[in-house]
Image (cartoon, grey):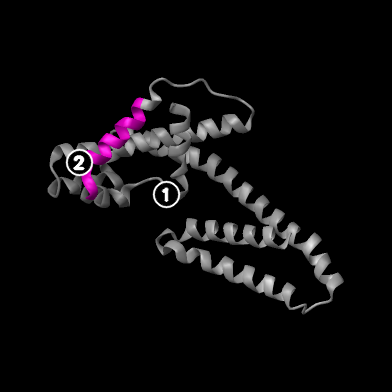
């Protein structure tokens, strides 16, 4: 029970910090690991009575882990629901004639002075495609949560292949320049796994 709980603490803490500070790399593991080491040390050194230690181990630590999992699940539901609404609004904005007057549109227009026109066009297409795929993935998640299985879209595999093609055509430098416009974050990366699984 102690090993399972401390392992869960390390994993949950690392994931939470990874969402907030993706640039920190493997350092996100250290805070959770420190907490796990302290808890394990307290138990091993018998700083409290054996009966109290057993009570904490059996009742308190599992409740803490369940509470953290519950909070994580609520955050996920909020992310799917609120994120879907935001993605739909952004996609409508990107497709509208007013997009050029927005901060995103002006930034994309500025890139024309640094990259060839076709590359900037590919950047615009990639932004739109990312939003479309994010909406599709979140829709699939919501349907599965409701116990429904959406029919397979035969065009999905082609859209994923198009995304890879656009990223290659834009190149590493172009993708770095596009980073401020990316409307998805690290938490959205696993959408791609979900979509690839559905596209097989």
Residue 157 percent coordinates (x, y): 38, 26
At horizontal 63% and vertical 47% (from top left) the residue drawn is 73
Furthest-right residue in view? 51
Q: Position of residue 135 (x, y in %)?
A: 45, 34
Give the numbered dot on residue 185.
1
Q: Is residue 118 left or right of residue 12?
A: left
Query: Which of the two discs, 1 and 2, labels the residue nearer the N terminus?
Result: 2
Magenta stretch in the rendered image: 158-172
Residue 54, position as x, y percentages in the image: 82, 66
Element on which disc 1 rests: loop
Q: Which residue is mark 2?
A: 120
Residue visible at 47% across and 32% down in the picture: 197
Considering the whole magenta stretch, tell me its main secondary structure. helix
**Relative horizontal placement of residue 52, taking residue 12 as reference (left or right):** right
* Residue 6 visible to the viewer: yes
Q: Quadrant of the N terminus?
A: bottom right
* Quarter of the picture holding the C terminus: top left
Q: CA distance from mark 1 to mark 2?
A: 21 Å
Nearer the observer, 132 or 53: 53
Whether 68 is drawn above or below 27: the answer is above
């Amino acid at each position: 029970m102690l090993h399972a709980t401390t392992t869960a603490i390390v994993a949950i803490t690392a994931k939470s910090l990874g969402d907030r500070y993706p640039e920190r790399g493997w350092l996100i593991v250290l805070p959770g690991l420190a907490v796990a080491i302290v808890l394990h040390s307290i138990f091993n050194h018998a700083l409290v009575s054996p009966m109290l230690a057993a009570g904490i181990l059996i009742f308190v630590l599992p409740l803490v882990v369940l509470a953290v999992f519950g909070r994580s699940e609520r955050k996920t539901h909020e992310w799917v629901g609120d994120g879907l609404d935001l993605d739909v609004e952004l996609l409508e904005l990107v497709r509208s004639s007013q997009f050029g007057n927005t901060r995103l549109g002006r930034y994309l227009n500025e890139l024309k002075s640094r990259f060839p026109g076709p590359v900037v066009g590919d950047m615009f297409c990639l932004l739109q495609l990312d939003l479309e795929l994010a909406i599709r993935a979140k829709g699939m998640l919501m349907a599965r949560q409701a116990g429904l299985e959406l029919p397979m879209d035969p065009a999905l595999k082609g859209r994923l292949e198009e995304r890879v093609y656009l990223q290659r055509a834009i190149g590493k430098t172009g993708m770095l320049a596009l980073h401020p416009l990316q409307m998805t974050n690290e938490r959205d990366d696993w959408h791609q796994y979900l979509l690839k699984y559905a596209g097989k």
